[in-house]
Amino acid sequence: MGNAYYHLGKVLKIIRENKGYSQQEISDSTMSRSNYTKLERDEINPNVVKYLAILDYMDMHHDEYSFILNDYSLNDKDTVLYLYKQMEQFPEITYVKKLINAANSLLEDRYDHMTKDVLNIAQAYYSLMEDHNLEVARKYAESTWERLKELDKFYLSELHLLNGILYLFEVETVISLTDRALKDLEKYYSFKEAEELRLSYLSHLSCILIAHEKYDLALKYVDQLITKSKNDSNVISFGAALVRQGLCLQGLDKEKESQESYALAIKLFRVMDREDLVKLTQENPKLVYNPYGYVDIELNTE
């Protein structure tokens, strides 16, 4: 958390005064006014229950308060997690390198399981996209899986990690893990983060199925990806999904329908001023936001 949390009370006072609330209003049923005064002076710290209650009275969530407390910026770990989550659906090599540097920087100061797992996944992606080395990528992914497989239940953070190592497993296992993850994500129906993660799972699974030339099955998930992207008004995701659709149709010898999907994807990319994606769709569509498109992927060849 860093030294910022030593000034928890001071920042609470600034926010409270800016919102025009009295100490009595914020401390009501949470703690005595005298204790709340001590809190704002950084003489005492609240327990978790009281802290969350205070934020509730302050009309604020912990994430926003933590951001403000850190001088309107993310702390080192939150930066790593933010970069990773932003990378998940649309990985690009320069972005992967940025994530690797951020994770390494944090780990130089202190060890953190989640950051180490994120670093493994980022290094694996780098091997896939830059070195085209599936064997090395799997070694990194296995390191993350060694920790995850010991857990009884996955929450959002673990679901993010699992999403980044799906290529480690046999295709039947990939489908099973994805279906389970999508089911678990339904519990987070009001979380925007969960909705974005759902898109990423669908994107990764469809890429892996296409790599295995399981086009009919891939279309099932691509259709979900298209519907979800449209409902979320996610234009880039919609365009990438149409590229996946084109690849599937092409694999099924439906050339006319395939070209129609590519053409629509290109229109969307041009609307978003993404000529890089237009060029990629025209020249090598399997590389459009697909870290697995750089290698001939064969899952679990043992």
Image: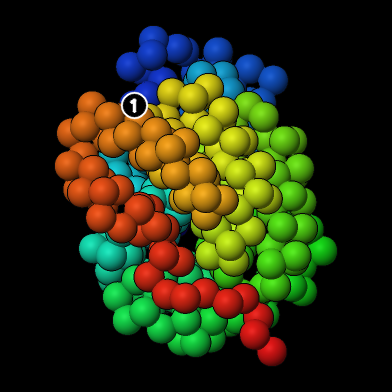
Q: Which residue is mark 1?
A: 14
From the viewer's side, name the closer residue of 55 and 215. 215
Q: Residue at x 58, y 77 (%)?
A: 298
Q: Position of residue 32 (x, y in %)?
A: 63, 25
Mark yes or no: residue 13 visible: no
The part of the image, by quadrant, that contains residue 64 is top left
Indicate left or right for 42 with 266 as reference: right
Q: Residue at x 58, y 23 (%)?
A: 56
From the viewer's side, name the closer residue of 265 and 273. 265
Q: Residue at x 21, y 49 (%)?
A: 279
Q: Position of residue 83 (x, y in %)?
A: 37, 54
Q: Up-down: is 101 above or below 75?
A: below
Helix or strand or loop: what does disc 1 sit on?
A: helix
The part of the image, by quadrant, that contains residue 73 is top left
Crowd class of label 1 (few under 14; some 14 to 19; many from 20; radius 10 Å): few
Give the position of the N terminus as an image quadrant. bottom left
Q: Position of residue 46 (x, y in %)?
A: 59, 41
Q: Position of residue 197 (x, y in %)?
A: 55, 44
From the viewer's side, name the closer residue of 14 and 173. 173
